[in-house]
Amino acid sequence: MKDKRIKELFASSVFILFIPFIINSQDVSVKVYPELKLQKIKSIGANYCQVRLTGIASDSIGEETLKQFRPENVRVAIPLKVRGTDYQNYKGEKYVEQPMIKALLEFMKRMKNEYGVKSFTLSTWDVPNELVVDPTATRARVLKPEAYSELLDLLVNFLVKAKNDYGFEVDYFSFNESEKGIAVIFSSAATIAFIKVAIKRFKEAGLNTKFLLSDAAMPGTSREFATLILADSTIWKSLGPLAFHSWGSERIPDSEFARVAALGKAINRPVWCTEMGHDGWAHREPAVFKTWDYAIRFAKISQRVIKHSQAEVTMYWTWQNDYPIMSRDLKTYYPSFYATRHFTNYLNTGTQIVNSMSSDPEVLTLSGIHENGTKILQLINLKKTAVNVKIQGLDSKSIDIVTTTEAHNWEEDKNATVSRKGIISVTLKAESINSILLN
């Protein structure tokens, strides 16, 4: 009888002991490590490449995003192939006299003087038919080796004109996704050969412009292409950041981004994501840009890129009327606009990214420290239900939370909670983007 009673008491005590465990197991644990520093953010920037599609450099969305977000780093398209114009009419020095090119130069000048842009990257998609092996090809167009210098006539004239007459210099140049030939294709050997010709031309013209290293379509291909280009050490001094695009990367593991970060450290080059986006075919169905699904997927890929590739510069595709984040009349801001604000407002220039971890793969974390000491923790809840989160590693008596959901674009909760015994407890709404600020 006594033994039976002992067994009953033991069973009851085990049940009681496990009650808090069962309750707490519903919580997600997030740990921040402020002492484990990663990269420092140089700029949350964007692409302004509309001229390649419309022949017009500026548009209403571009002006509004420049005004609101004031990016320090931008990537601009340079149309070295002027559509609808005979090549002989814009060949050589005549290139910079084209109305479209003058307008592009003027737009870039205003970017610097009116909106505070500090660094320009220039990329081209296509080249004149007369300079390629097969003028009838629309993709994988091969630039004739003997035409390198002639193409550089256009580029050098633009760069010199920008410097001497418009008051700005271009830091970096690239052929967009040339590894796969979205328009022009370059092998690594051809890339090296072109850069060598360009180095001489740039030096003669008094230019300091360097080349992005790779600027390929995906993290993996960018890393591979960069490695092949690095085989020739004589051009290393003319190579800038290790650049990649995030297209087609939603399903790749975080380790693929981490391998980009590792290469950057190995070659002592900063990592840049020069086209930040998740769906390279979204332009075929423009209605998707207005959706919440597009916004939260963009936030997810952006966070993964910043955290795991340790990108110092990211450039949204785009802040113009191509993959737009607002309507052309500026009356309607799409959900992706508010998703973007979580990065431009709270994870921008000067933010020191630190390591953070989550116990749940559907609650994503990104943490940083601002130059004034304010700490930021971005949490993205991908679950279709609300979730309780216990945060360790941060401490503050004043904690603000900004949340974006499908139902509410921007909710600010001042002094939402405080830390207690080193733990901050928050509840994240279903499918939400959250910025937690610890002042």
Image (cartoon, rainbow, N blue to C red):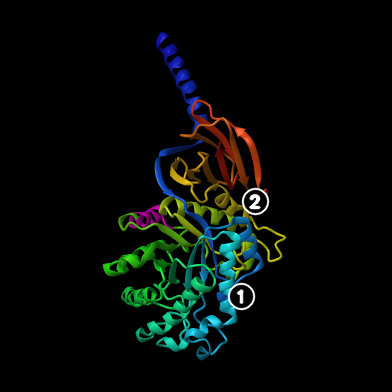
Q: Secondary structure at mark 2?
A: loop
Please state if 91 lies on the left or on the right of 144 as rendered. Answer: right
Marks 1, 2: nearer the viewer: 1
* Tag shown at residue 406: 2
Q: Residue at position x 30%, y 66% from top?
A: 230
* Main secondary structure along the magenta-highlighted residues: helix
**Which of the image's four quarters has the N terminus?**
top left
Checking the image for residue 56, the label placed there is: 1
- Could you tell me which residue is drawn at 56 percent across and 63 percent down? 112
Q: Position of residue 404 (x, y in %)?
A: 62, 48
Q: Which residues are magenta?
A: 252-264
Identity of the residue drawn at 40% across and 72% down: 206
Query: Which of the image's four quarters has the C terminus?
Result: top right
Which percent across, then down, holds residue 414?
64, 37
The type of residue carrying mark 2 is Glu
**In the image, residue 61 lies at what x, y percent?**
64, 64
Q: Residue at x 40, y 77 (%)?
A: 185
As displayed, is residue 33 above or below residue 433? Answer: above
Sort mark 1 into few (<14), some (14-19) or many (20+) by Cα contacts within 10 Å.
some
Query: In this rendering, is residue 99 above or below 74?
Result: below
The foreground one among 405 and 385 is 405
The first of marks 1 and 2 along the sequence is: 1
Local secondary structure at mark 1: loop
Check if residue 262 falls in the magenta segment: yes
Q: Nearer the viewer, residue 93 or 188?
A: 93
Q: Quadrant of residue 418?
A: top right
User: From this viewpoint, is residue 26 visible?
Assistant: no
